[in-house]
């Protein structure tokens, strides 16, 4: 491993236009704002991309500042193991953790899964997201994607029963998972879950607000329920066992692939099904998650498909089938 004293570190904010708009219960956006960290020595550069999430109080500027604060520790030899304690879980640590992993792989001439003792990733089927809108608008968008085997439907509260019924009619053959993004309440929870069950939905993500989801433990759930905003890293798993059937692991929440892999193993040991999720970002952010996809029942790595364009050398998508990254992109 190259000494920290000889490594260079650079951080930048990038903006990627979204194809149209991406709408969830908390609002809409027309561009993905990402932060990219790059660790280099000579001709070898390792990169990692993250998406700061305002839901967790993150901004691109604060993430940039947090990463720049790691210049001195990196110069003194900070490695990936020490990074886990040096920074809190979140988007900033994700970018640096993935950059260090990429750097380790490139500088050793090995693929990252070999370094980590993991099986080589295989192509897998990713969900494709339908943004929140009127039932008519969502049905129209769904009809265009009805050939895809797995659709993720964004819901938002009042009128969700009509939305999911319209979507199911437009895509009678697709497997459906829905994401309420904390928009339901304890009062309408059972009604909405029943509507999803009637539409043949397989999984419901985060129906209630994080920290106010205790009602999930006291009802019979007709559809499997997945934690998203309620789960971040391994420390948050134990308290969710009575409320959730699955957990959505995202690198921006766990603070990188290092913790995400450990979390996936711990979650499976506790009996949770695994979902691998993403923010809207480029293939550089998706690539590390492909290692996790091998353990997942549900894969949601469609971020680049929602952009007007992906970065050069991005992941290969063949319809809904996504392929592991080439070494030049990551790992």
Image (cartoon, helix red, strand yellow):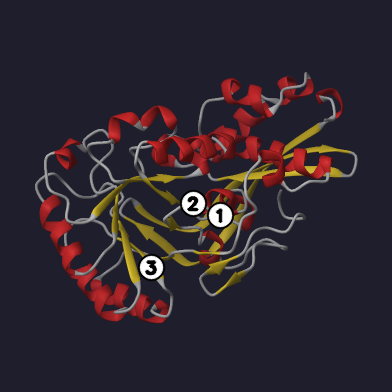
Looking at the image, tell me whether mark 2 or mark 3 is earlier in sequence order.
3
Q: 182 or 177, which lies in front?
A: 177
Q: Secondary structure at mark 1?
A: loop
The mark tally for this picture is 3
10 Å crowding of disc 2: few (<14), some (14-19), many (20+) = many
Relative to 54, say whether 77 is above or below. above
**Is residue 194 found left or right of 80 in the rendered image?**
left
The location of residue 89, given as percent across then percent down, is: 51, 30
Residues under numbered marks 3 and 1 in contact, where contact means CB atoms less than 8 Å apart: no
Q: CA distance from mark 2 to mark 3?
A: 14 Å
Relative to 138, say whether 107 is above or below. above
Q: Which residue is mark 2?
A: 278
Looking at the image, tell me whether mark 3 or mark 1 is earlier in sequence order.
3
**Is residue 45 found left or right of 294 in the rendered image?**
right
Q: CA distance from mark 3 to mark 1?
A: 18 Å
10 Å crowding of disc 1: few (<14), some (14-19), many (20+) = many
Q: Residue at x 21, y 38 (%)?
A: 213
Q: Which residue is mark 1?
A: 281
Residue found farthest to the right: 42
The location of residue 245, given as percent across then percent down, is: 29, 46
Of labels 3 and 1, the one closer to you: 3
Relative to 122, say whether 85 is above or below. above
Q: Which residue is mark 3?
A: 151
10 Å crowding of disc 3: few (<14), some (14-19), many (20+) = many
Q: Residue at x 75, y 37 (%)?
A: 10
């Amino acid at each position: 491993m190259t000494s920290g004293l000889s490594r260079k570190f650079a951080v930048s904010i990038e903006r990627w236009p979204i194809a149209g708009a991406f709408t969830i219960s908390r609002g809409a956006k027309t561009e993905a704002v990402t932060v990219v960290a790059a660790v280099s020595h000579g001709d070898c550069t390792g990169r990692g991309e993250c998406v700061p999430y305002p839901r967790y109080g993150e901004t691109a500027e604060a993430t940039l500042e947090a990463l720049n604060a790691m210049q001195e520790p990196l110069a003194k030899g900070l490695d990936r193991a020490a990074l886990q304690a040096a920074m809190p879980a979140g988007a900033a640590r994700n970018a640096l953790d993935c950059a260090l992993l990429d750097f380790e792989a490139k500088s050793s001439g090995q693929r990252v899964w070999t370094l980590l003792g993991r099986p080589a990733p295989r192509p897998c089927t990713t969900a494709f997201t339908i943004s929140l809108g009127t039932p008519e608008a969502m049905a129209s968008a769904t009809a265009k994607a009805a050939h895809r085997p797995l659709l993720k439907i964004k819901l938002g509260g009042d009128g969700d029963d009509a939305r999911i019924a319209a979507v199911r009619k437009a895509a009678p053959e697709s497997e459906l998972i829905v994401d309420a993004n904390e928009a339901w309440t304890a009062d309408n929870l059972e009604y909405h879950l029943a509507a999803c069950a009637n539409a043949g939905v397989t999984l419901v993500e985060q129906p209630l607000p994080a920290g106010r989801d205790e009602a999930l433990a006291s009802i019979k759930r007709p559809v499997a329920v997945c934690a998203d905003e309620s789960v971040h890293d391994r420390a948050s798993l134990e308290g969710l066992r009575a409320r959730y059937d699955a957990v959505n692991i995202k690198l921006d929440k766990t603070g990188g692939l290092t913790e995400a892999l450990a979390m996936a193993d711990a979650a499976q040991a506790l009996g949770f099904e695994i979902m691998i999720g993403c923010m809207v970002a480029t293939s550089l952010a998706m690539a590390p998650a492909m290692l996790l996809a091998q353990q997942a029942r549900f894969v949601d790595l469609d971020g680049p498909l929602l952009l007007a364009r992906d970065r050069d050398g991005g992941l290969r998508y063949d319809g809904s089938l996504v392929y592991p990254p080439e070494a030049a992109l990551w790992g």
